[in-house]
Amino acid sequence: MNASGSGPAIETNGLVKEFERGRRTIWERVRREPDQRERFRAVDGVDLSVARGEIFGLLGPNGAGKTTTMRMLATLLEPTSGTATVLGRDVVREAREVRRRMGAVLSDGRSVYWKLTARENLEYFAALYHVPAGTARQRIQAALEAVTLADRADDYVERFSTGMRQRLVLARALLPDPELLLLDEPTVGLDPQSARDLRDRVVGLREQGRTVLLTTHYMEEADQLCDRIAIIDHGRIAALDTPAALKRTIAAAEVVRLELPAPAPSNGGVAPVLERLGRVGTIAHSERQDGALLVTMHCRSARDFVPAAFDAARDAGTVIRHVEVVPVTLEDVFLSLTGRGLRE
Amino acid sequence: MSGGEGRLASLIGDLRAFGAAARKEWRLLRRYPSLFIGFLFWPIALPTAYVLQAQGYAGSSVAATNAFASRAGTGEIAGFLFLGWATYMWISMILWGPGTALRTEQVRGSLEAIFITPASRLVVIFGPAVSQVIWALWMFAVVGMAMGVFFGVDLGLAAVLRALTVIILAVPALYGLGALFAAIVLRFGEVHALVQTVRGLFTVFCGMTFPIIILPEWARAVALALPPTYLIGDLRHVLLTGASLTDLVPDLAILLTIGIALCLLAVVAFRSTERYARRGGSLAQY
């Protein structure tokens, strides 16, 4: 592995990326009319410090700013303001040096050449990564073995499954023998077995001493893989800590999800029901869905809480149709921080 | 590693990447062998239609042939038309080449994967286009053979070597234009309309199928500012009228100067549009 100095693997300070919404016609440009497009911040002042050798996760819903952050670190996007260094190199001023030192999975299996074999794909990218001719063959073989594709190396990629193609994309990222890997939603679109397989490989990368920055909106994936997690929403970091510490921020030992019939407005709506339930536990979230009222509640002990919840529902003139008791997850942390679910 | 050694290693890496890009494209082409059959047919069929049209107009009239020769500098009508069309087809390939290669990578989803490697952007623009040299050689060989077999045009080895020199000297100008189109792809994500327009201009002004002397004076001035005019004219001179390269030094110097200017312009334009794409996030958009 190409190790390069000490200090954090990634450091960002006040990183901002703004985009314009809407379009500006050629006529408006020619007439030099003022640009009236709305500007919005996809990333809004992100401060990060990722230590070498850790798996660091950016967790957030779609559109939270995870991928934009990742693309700025990968030198594909220029920040509007703020700074970002990768392995001690500035992503704008020293972009080529940054690219030389990291591998990245920023796309799905579509980004490989289907009419080439796996080995031919890697031969091409090994040359683009400036892998010396003397070591390219060996490096390609090692990358293929790392993702268990060595036995299919000479098959056309068009014959691969989605999971195999995604593994080939990971093999491509390993070609420069990078100290740092950026993985953007690496398991999206994979079946459970392939996703588990890829997650195992990510853990293997850390065991080899590499740093991994990954984005995901799968809380289980972040919980299982990451040493530390930054929860990101609307372009800002809402919380940053280890998964266990993040979950401890929820003042509850268990989460209880209740399903009740949605009360009609003529019966006072949901307010009386929630008011009574709120007397026996902490309401983390509630929503109407398909004629039902779904309530997520935090409590110290479900054993004590659930009977009290049934009593509260009865007092409010309704019934609880379904109860689910689950441990605290990162989804609950996100919910408590943002008032929204990760998949909303 | 010192700065000088680093730059040398980077240059060697880029040269290898350049070769790998051409090899990759060639491998992809080989997977579709039927394309070669198409390229066997068109370089013969298209100019043949024009030769037959010319014969339809002039028949066996000596006066008509002499009139053509006095304007074109050669009475070899078939050779004149075949060379014009072969050059036109080669130019089309090059104009489409870098821009289309970039666009294909963009649509395929591999452009970002390429742009996060340390390889020079010149590799991305020109590497895949190099594989088209094989197409060009194939096409010129087919055309040369057709001219000899069907119309009895004898080119001769010495003339062919002089023609190759002209082609090599035209490469910077044509690839410079191709790279400009690649820059346009990064900026607008589309290049077809512009390439079609430019090809149309070349057809009208550069004398693909006629001697430019018949154009009005203002149009001749336009023609002389376009590199394909020199390429086509000089190829005809060396292959059909027996001109030496020394006779063509002024033309070739202009061609080379335009070529260098276009390449520099293309590099500046590509850097600028790449920066634009990095700011706006349009690298992966299509």
Image (cartoon, coloured by chain):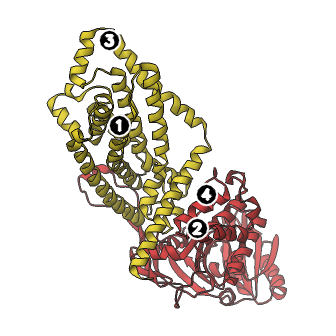
Chain colours: A red, B yellow
Residue type, numbered disc 2: Asn
- Where disc 3 sits, the SS reads helix
Marks 2 & 4, CB-CB < 8 Å contact: no
Residue named by callout 2: A62
Mark before the other along the chain sequence, 2 or 4 = 2
Which class describes the residues within 10 Å of circle 3: few (<14), some (14-19), or many (20+)?
few
Q: In the rendered structure, find residue A25 and report the number of the disc placed on it.
A: none
Q: Nearer the viewer, residue B203 or A329?
A: B203
Name the quadrant containing residue A243: bottom right
Marks 3 & 1, CB-CB < 8 Å contact: no
- Asked if labels 2 and 4 share a chain, the reply is yes
Q: Nearer the viewer, residue A88 or B227?
A: B227
- Give the letter of the chain under mark 4: A
Q: In the rendered structure, find residue B199 and report the number of the disc placed on it.
A: 1
Residue type, numbered disc 4: Val
Query: What residue is rendered at 51% in x and 33% in y?
Result: B39
Q: What is the x, y in percent for residue B228? A: 30, 39
Marks 4 & 3, CB-CB < 8 Å contact: no
Return the residue found at the far left.
Answer: B217
- Where disc 1 sits, the SS reads helix
Between label 2 and label 4, give the one nearer the viewer: 4
- Give the letter of the chain under mark 3: B
- Asked if labels 1 and 2 share a chain, the reply is no
Residue named by callout 4: A112
- Where disc 2 sits, the SS reads loop
Quarter in which the N terminus of chain A is drawn: bottom right
CA distance separating discs 4 and 1 = 32 Å
Above or below — where is A328 with respect to B143? Answer: below
- Asked if labels 4 and 3 share a chain, the reply is no
Q: Nearer the viewer, residue A150 or A114?
A: A150
Residue type, numbered disc 3: Tyr
Which class describes the residues within 10 Å of circle 2: few (<14), some (14-19), or many (20+)?
some
